[in-house]
Image (tube, helix red, strand yellow):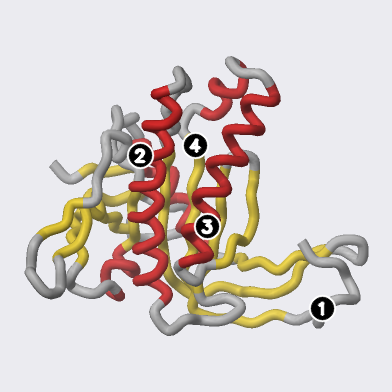
Amino acid sequence: DMIAGDLQLGGSNKEVTVFLSDIRGFTKFSEGHTPEEVVGMLNEYFGIMVTIITANHGIVDKFVGDAIMAVWGAPNSSGDDQNFALKACLEMRVALGELNKRRLSIGQSAIMIGMGLHTGRAISGTIGSNERMEYTVIGDTVNLTARIEASTKSFGTDLLVSDAIVASLPSTYLYSLAGEAEVKGKSEPIKMYLVRGYRDAVSGEEMIIETPYSSYSAEADEKVKVVA
């Protein structure tokens, strides 16, 4: 959050990569735990994920309940935004697995998440009122990212990326078409891909980055077509 007067107002339209995630079953978790336990879990989880995002040149745009929105390319681009963003997603997958090992060892439940990643043009700028302003990105790219993240439930996976991400990726990443999803206001469905890991640039060996929490039972959605 930013305070009015400390920043120059304005907006720009630029290429950004947007990440969205949320925790599966968070409402049920909240109902079954004390407020202190819920806040403690969120703070530990957010701390781990935010460290990974910032280490990979991303900016945390906001927290909404249990959800994280992060951006690469705004206000400044690293020149390799999609690559850094996907690298962060795979690192978050591993870090969540390690966090869950610790949680299970002390009798706590595992955390399951869904992550969506998309790249495209968006409006960025400081938005709000005289009392409170914040820098954020808005527009179709953000909306599509939300649709992709929501579709992880239908595919029973923790991560889906768009065809725009795949088109910009180095060939070393290991991905496969998961399926398509209809999007309100779009004439064509969006294609979404699973990412399993990467191929080592030197040895050529496939490095599979998956954990027991990378997949779970899928939920049917008539607007989502899963590749058989």
Secondary structure beneath disc 2? helix
**Amino acid, disc 2:** Gly
* CB contact under 8 Å: marks 3 and 1: no
Name the mark on residue 55.
Answer: none
Q: Where does the N terminus fall, quadrant-wise? A: bottom right
Residue that label 1 marks: 7
- Which x, y percent locates residue 186? 42, 60
Image-based side of 123 in relation to 208, left or right? right
Residue in the picture at 42% in, 69% down: 119
How packed mark 2 is, by other alpha carbons closer than 10 Å (few <14, some 14-19, many 20 or more), is many
Instruction: Please name the amino acid that badge 3 sits on.
Output: Thr
The residue tagged 3 is 51
Task: Indicate which label's residue lies in the foreground, 3 or 4.
Answer: 3
Q: Is residue 155 visible?
A: no
Q: Is residue 57 left or right of residue 151?
A: right
User: On screen, 94 above or below 128?
Assistant: above
Select label 4 or label 2 by which is in front: 2
Question: Which amino acid, mark 1?
Answer: Leu
Three-letter residue code for mark 4: Ile
Distance Cα–Cα, label 4 vs label 2: 14 Å
Mark 1 packing: few (<14 Cα in 10 Å), some, or many (20+)? few
- Residue that numbered label 4 is attached to: 23
Q: Find the distance from the CA under tag 3 to the CA under tag 2.
A: 16 Å
Could you give the CA–CA distance between mark 2 and mark 1, rounded to whole angstroms? Answer: 39 Å
Quadrant of the image occupied by residue 110: top left
Eyeballing the image, is 121 above or below 213? below
Q: Are marks 4 and 1 in contact (CB under 8 Å)?
A: no
Position of residue 220 measured from the top left corner of the image (x, y, whole percent): 32, 30
Report if the CB atoms under discs 3 and 2 are less than 8 Å apart: no
